[in-house]
Image (cartoon, rainbow, N blue to C red):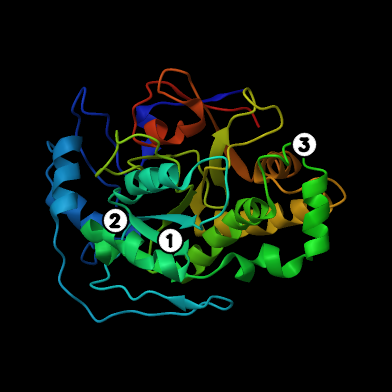
Amino acid sequence: MSLHCRERTFSAVKSSNDVQPTTFSSKVSQAGQKSAPTGLRALAHALNSKTTVRQADQKIASVVLPEEPNATFRPAGLQAVNQIVGTVNSDITIVTAYFKISSKHSTSEYKSWMANMLSLTEAMVIFTTLDMKEDILKLRSHARNRTKVVLTTLKETSMAKRFSSRFWGHQHSIDREKRIHNINLYWIWNEKSNFLKQAADINPFQSSFLAWVDIGYFRTKTYNGKRMILQIPKQLKEDQIMLLDISPLAKGFYGGGFIGGFKPGIERWHKAYYATFEANMNGFVGSDQPLMYKTCQRIRDICLPVKFDKKHGDPWFFMTPYLRGLTKDNVLSKK
């Protein structure tokens, strides 16, 4: 049976789009009510119940938070980590990455999409190379106190280190789309879940919900300067992850552009995904999307798949209108 997920079933920040302004509110945990609210909680606390989404977007984008001592960290296996100035806590953190590699899309296309993505107001952890650091920080100038840049290289990823060049060469040889794919892409695709877990482990903004989002997820400027995630379905359990069911478009695939959950769910997903990877190494494991689908089928209660509709742009990027509350009837897929 499908689970229907309407507006009243959502928690966190509830809203609709600018078409019909609705109230902006935040669900503060009962345990945290006695302490002073921080980050997005503080903003939600300050905004009254009649504040529209548009007004909330503008207020959050314009907030200037006090400077605090720089915070640095160096997770194992990473070269270096950028310092955060004026760190602030945030209920939601988006995790993403960018590496210059050959792709079916041009560098100029990715830079345009990256500018759209990085204009969002959520806190972000961004994995990238040293040569991209300054460019990324410029694109996050509006949210420096909500930005952590982790400096690394593709060769330092677990996918590059754990498996030999011979293994990856064989993977490329059996890839049906090898004309437009390469080993670097395999590394990035299969490292997403690891990047997400690393971000959840260090959790620089003390977020309760973290989500991997591809840096090319925003192909237009529609959401520039806004938030991607305004609501989270109540059906999402602490030990689950949420993703997009694109199997009607690509049989046996779940969308790899978004993976979101609470820390217990992210930890559980990390173990399950890489167990699925290793269990299927005799076949093609270069692409993350079929492995995501197989993981969800193998462990039925680990995933909360979201069914897209065709009324809100490209179905592959449906998670944005879904999580912003723009879809009237959000239907969760059958597991």
Q: Sequence order check: which comes first, mark 3 or mark 1?
A: 1
Picture quadrant where residue 333 is located: top right
- Residue nearer the viewer, 53 or 312: 312
Picture quadrant where residue 188 is located: bottom right
* Residue 139 left/right relative to 75: left
User: Helix or strand or loop: what does disc 3 sit on?
Assistant: loop
Q: Is residue 170 above or below residue 134?
A: above
> Could one spot residue 33 in this view of the protein?
no
Q: Residue at x 23, y 72 (%)?
A: 86
- Residue nearer the viewer, 206 or 132: 132
Q: Are marks 1 and 2 in contact (CB under 8 Å)?
A: no
- Residue nearer the viewer, 73 or 24: 73
Give the Cα distance between marks 3 and 2: 36 Å
> Could one spot residue 240 in this view of the protein?
yes
Label 2 sits on residue: 139
User: Helix or strand or loop: what does disc 1 sit on?
Assistant: strand
Label 3 sits on residue: 176
Amino acid type shown at disc 1 = Ile
